[in-house]
Image (cartoon, grey):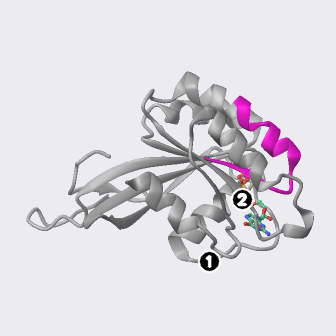
């Protein structure tokens, strides 16, 4: 993560100034949420940022959006700037432009959707094409609360993650399971 405390862009693009002698964070880092449309990226971010779950109608993200959250890791305050990308194919050219600046990527699939799991290899190919070579990647099997509709076993997620040498967790934006853990793991 980069050490640039002080002024920072807020979600609305306004300057967020901190007193020069006591910055509100020690480090900053850019994280991107990636994965097919509907896997739960926006809900995952809202759960982490606000501790809430957006149930009801699914509103697909248009283009890209971001939110900031400061977390404490090993006594250091890390400001995470988290970019929520649109999973829909038609927005890919927009989101590609943001890969380069990301230090960490959370790549999500939905454990109730085989197609979202099958897309992971294509996502990893895109990541290798557009992201920094040393980017931190984590694979997440989201919607783990939907056990009766599960079609992807935990072992399948683990095997795929091992093949690509990335860490893996199952998560739920609905219950909050492992959401904070995933962000803290990549913030380290
Ligand atoms: N049960 C359950 N539903 C979830 C979970 N996460 C998301 N959902 C639901 O899945 C749908 C899609 O969630 P979004 O967060 O909008 O999906 P997205 O990946 O951001 O989609 P795009 O913006 O199109 O890329 C919504 O109806 C959510 O309520 C979860 O962990 N559990």
Labels 1, 2: front one: 2
Q: Is residue 27 magenta?
A: no
**In this picture, residue 11 sits left or right of residue 65:** left
Q: Is residue 119 magenta?
A: yes
Q: Which type of secondary structure does the marked residue at label 2 adopt?
A: strand
Q: Is residue 65 visible?
A: yes
- Kindly tell me whether mark 2's CB lies below 8 Å from ligand 1: yes
Measured from the top left, where is residue 169 in percent x and y?
63, 56
Q: Disc number at residue 52?
A: 1
In magenta, the rendered stretch is 107-122
Relative to 45, is 91 above or below? above
Q: Quadrant of residue 69?
A: bottom left
> Which residue is label 2 attached to?
142
Q: Tell me if label 1 and label 2 are in contact, CB under 8 Å.
A: no
Q: How many marks?
A: 2
Q: Residues within 10 Å of mark 2 (few under 14, many from 20)?
A: many
Relative to 173, is 175 above or below? below
- Kindly tell me whether mark 1's CB lies below 8 Å from ligand 1: no
Outermost residue, left side:
21
Q: How far separated are the C-alphas under marks 1 and 2?
A: 16 Å
Q: Residue at x 57, y 41 (%)?
A: 166
Q: Residue at x 58, y 62 (%)?
A: 45
Q: Residue at x 78, y 36 (%)?
A: 119
Quarter of the image where ligand 1 sits = bottom right
Measured from the top left, where is residue 112 in percent x and y?
86, 57
Q: State which tag comes first along the sequence, 1 or 2.
A: 1
């Amino acid at each position: 993560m980069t050490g640039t405390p002080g002024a920072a862009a807020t979600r609305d693009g306004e300057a967020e100034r901190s007193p020069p002698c006591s910055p509100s964070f020690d480090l900053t880092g850019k994280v991107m949420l990636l994965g097919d449309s509907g896997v739960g990226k926006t809900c995952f971010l809202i759960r982490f940022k606000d501790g809430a779950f957006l149930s009801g109608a699914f509103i697909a993200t248009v283009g890209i959006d971001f939110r900031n959250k400061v977390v404490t890791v090993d006594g250091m305050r890390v400001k995470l700037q988290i970019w929520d990308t649109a999973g829909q194919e038609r927005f890919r050219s927009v989101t590609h432009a943001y890969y380069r600046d990301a230090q960490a990527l959370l790549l999500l699939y939905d454990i109730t959707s085989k197609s979202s799991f099958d897309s992971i290899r294509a996502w990893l190919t895109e990541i290798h094409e557009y992201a920094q070579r040393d980017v931190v990647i984590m694979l997440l099997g989201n919607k783990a609360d939907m056990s009766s509709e599960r079609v992807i076993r935990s072992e399948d997620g683990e095997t795929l993650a091992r093949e690509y040498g990335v860490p893996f967790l199952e998560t739920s934006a609905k219950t909050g399971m492992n959401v904070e853990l995933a962000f803290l793991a990549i913030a380290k």
